[in-house]
Amino acid sequence: MPDRITLVTALQGAGWHPAAWRAADSDAERLTSLRHWRDIVVEQDRLGVDAVTIEDSFTAGPERDGDLDTTTVIGRLDALLIAAAVAPATRQIGLVPTVSVTHTEPFHVATSLQTLDHVSLGRAGWRLQVSPTAREAALFGRRTLPATPDDATVAELFAEAREVAEVVDRLWDSWDDDAIIRDVTTGRFIDRDRIHNAEFVGEHVSVHGASIVPRSPQGRPPVFSLAHRSDAAALAVDVADVVLVTPGFDGREDRELLAEVRHLEQVAGSTAPRPVLADLAVLIGSSSAAAADELAALDDLAGTPYVSDTSVLATTVPDLVSRIAGLRELGYAGVRLRPLRIPTDSTAIARQLVPALVTAGLRADVASRPAVDLRTRLGIAPAVSRHSTVRTSRTLSTEGVSA
């Protein structure tokens, strides 16, 4: 059982509900403003949330009847660039952008995330995602995908994702910790023998050579993967450090989902269980009745009830604490919460839920939270390079980081 609950906030536009941008307290006019994102993430950081994930896609927004659904937020900023932009304003929170592997070269994925890990002083993560739609494929023109992804297409995309994740790992390991020697006497900046080529030839990707970015503070930023169906769960167990499951999707329950991940780990020969987080969509109200009314009001604006790939909870802070405590008892490492309204529900997570979890004994007080890298904060072992025998965990320096 985890010693403390991991708490992650999932940021998407004006919130996960498609009508959230129309709410009176919405911040929708600032969605393309750096200040909007910085204000949200800084508050999550200051009040003790462990990490934020930032959603992304190659589509500008949700689709309806084969075209963009203009009743929802359309347009987005690049998640990885948002994370890099807010990093200097934050101190301890993990920054986990969503980056697709379907149309993105693994070299670019690897070097961009390494750079984020450097500029955040060891707080970068990566939510790995595939891009299965024909609309996304058409933007790149290198492959054709069916209008409706079938099982064979999804299987191929997952196979490609496994290869990309392997290549990214190899590129992250390509520089030893001490490859930069800065030997003024001999005039050598690096020891070439401490840089290794990431040799990989697969069905989908092939890479020869090393990363251009020196090994980052964590070595390998932790990988998150969403296991909302069985084949996705198998992919997550193969490539991820943190598995996200979706209680309630297709009627599947908390215990069943966790058991499936543990079974897949055994089949894969995993030596240590991964942290599993329950993904929950939340609207937090002052009472159960108020929360239900507020969700109904959003549904009325949208013209249809909100349906997700996970449980949708119109709830209160005490009820949410009870749900999280129950997950902890089952063996979950924590939760990733999708606020239906931003900033309303993201603010409630930081200002109300965090202290309530502390009071319930599920988390330590913010003041006692050490400044450590994201792997350590998530309870993941330090990354050991395939080219070395030992890598020690790092305590973060706050030098150069402003509040």
Image (tube, rainbow, N blue to C red):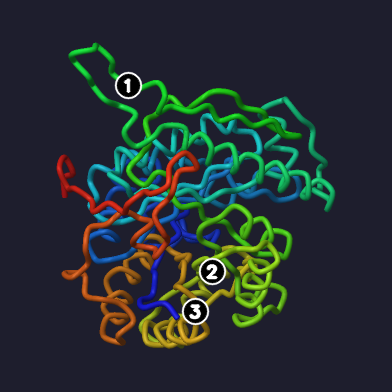
Relative to 132, does residue 183 appear above or below in the rendering?
Answer: above
Q: Which of marks 2 and 3 is in front?
A: 2
Contact between marks 1 and 3 (CB within 8 A): the answer is no
Q: Residue at x 72, y 31 (%)?
A: 138
Q: Nearer the viewer, mark 1 or mark 3?
A: 1
Q: Residues within 10 Å of mark 3 (few under 14, many from 20)?
A: many
398, 181: nearer the viewer: 181
Relative to 203, does residue 72 appear above or below in the rendering?
Answer: below
3D distance between C-alphas at marks 1 and 3: 56 Å
Helix, strand or loop at label 3? It is strand
Q: Which of marks 2 and 1 is in front?
A: 1
Q: Which residue is drawn at 66% across and 80% down?
A: 256
Tell me which numbered mark, 2 or 1, is placed earlier along the sequence: 1
3D distance between C-alphas at marks 2 and 3: 31 Å
Question: Residue 283 sits in which quadrant?
Answer: bottom left
Tell me which numbered mark, 1 or 3, is placed earlier along the sequence: 1
Q: Mark 3 points at which residue?
A: 314
Which residue type carries mark 1? Ile
Q: Mark 2 points at which residue?
A: 273
Q: Is residue 80 visible in the rendered structure shown here?
A: yes
Q: Mark 1 points at which residue?
A: 190
Q: Indicate the position of residue 97 as horizontal and vertical percent values.
A: 45, 47
3D distance between C-alphas at marks 2 and 1: 37 Å
Tell me which numbered mark, 2 or 3, is placed earlier along the sequence: 2
Q: Residues within 10 Å of mark 2 (few under 14, many from 20)?
A: some
Which residue type carries mark 2? Pro
Contact between marks 2 and 1 (CB within 8 A): the answer is no
Which residue type carries mark 3? Ala
Q: Indicate the position of residue 66 as horizontal and vertical percent values.
A: 75, 45
Q: How crowded is mark 1: few (under 14 residues within 10 Å), some or many (20 or more)?
A: some
Relative to 192, does residue 285 appear above or below in the rendering?
Answer: below
